[in-house]
Amino acid sequence: MRKLLIAKDKPEIRNLLRTEFTCSGWSPFCCGTFQDAINLINWTNITAIICGENFPDGTGRNLYQYLRSQTDARRTIPFIFYTGYPWVLKFSKGYRDNLLLGIQATRHRPEADFQALHQALQRLCPH
């Protein structure tokens, strides 16, 4: 089963995403801190990551940079920034990385966000 790390600081969003992706055949692992995300990445064979920006102990950009600095398979884990911050679209284009996508959260329209996240995962993890 494909393992999805959902790293978001807000528990209500993590729970919505966990439910959505469990129903879609993923095995979600959820966390709300940078260090918990690092631990899950290091000890679980994660297939893809959906990540926010703000954590009490770090940022989503720090997590992305940590992944890309690794010398093993963790370096190639597909990464989706999912945040309400508009910079996310420019950030992901600036990296020219076929393993990175940015999705700006649409307030009050979770079904549109879910559709965009599903499409992003299909693009980044086709099998």
Image (cartoon, helix red, strand yellow):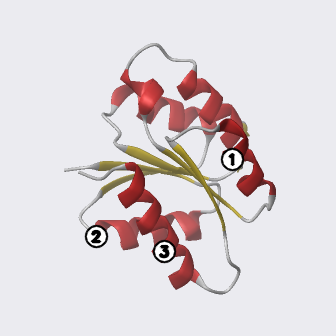
Q: Secondary structure at mark 2?
A: loop
User: Where does the image place residue 101, in percent across and percent down from the top left?
Assistant: 57, 51
Q: Is residue 62 above or below residue 16?
A: above
Tell whether label 3 touches label 1 (CB within 8 Å): no
Instruction: Give me the C-alpha separation between circle 1 and circle 3.
Output: 21 Å
Q: Please give the residue where the numbered disc 2 appears in the rendered image.
A: 24
- Residue farthest along the left direction in this orientation: 1
Q: Please give the residue where the numbered disc 3 appears in the rendered image.
A: 114
Tell whether label 3 touches label 2 (CB within 8 Å): no
Instruction: Give me the C-alpha separation between circle 2 and circle 3.
Output: 11 Å
Query: Which sits in the foreground, 77 or 42?
Result: 77
Q: Is label 2 or label 1 in front?
A: 1
Residue type for callout 3: Phe
Q: Secondary structure at mark 3?
A: helix
User: Where does the image place residue 88, in percent across and percent down from the top left?
Assistant: 73, 54
Q: Residue at x 41, y 45 (%)?
A: 48
Q: Residue at x 35, y 27 (%)?
A: 43
Please tell me how crowded label 3 is: few (under 14), some (14-19), or many (20+) other residues with Cα within 10 Å. some
User: Where does the image place residue 3, in percent across and percent down from the top left?
Assistant: 31, 47
Query: Which sits in the foreground, 97 or 50?
Result: 97
Is there any visible trace of residue 44 in the rendered image?
yes
Residue type for callout 2: Ser
Residue type for callout 1: Lys
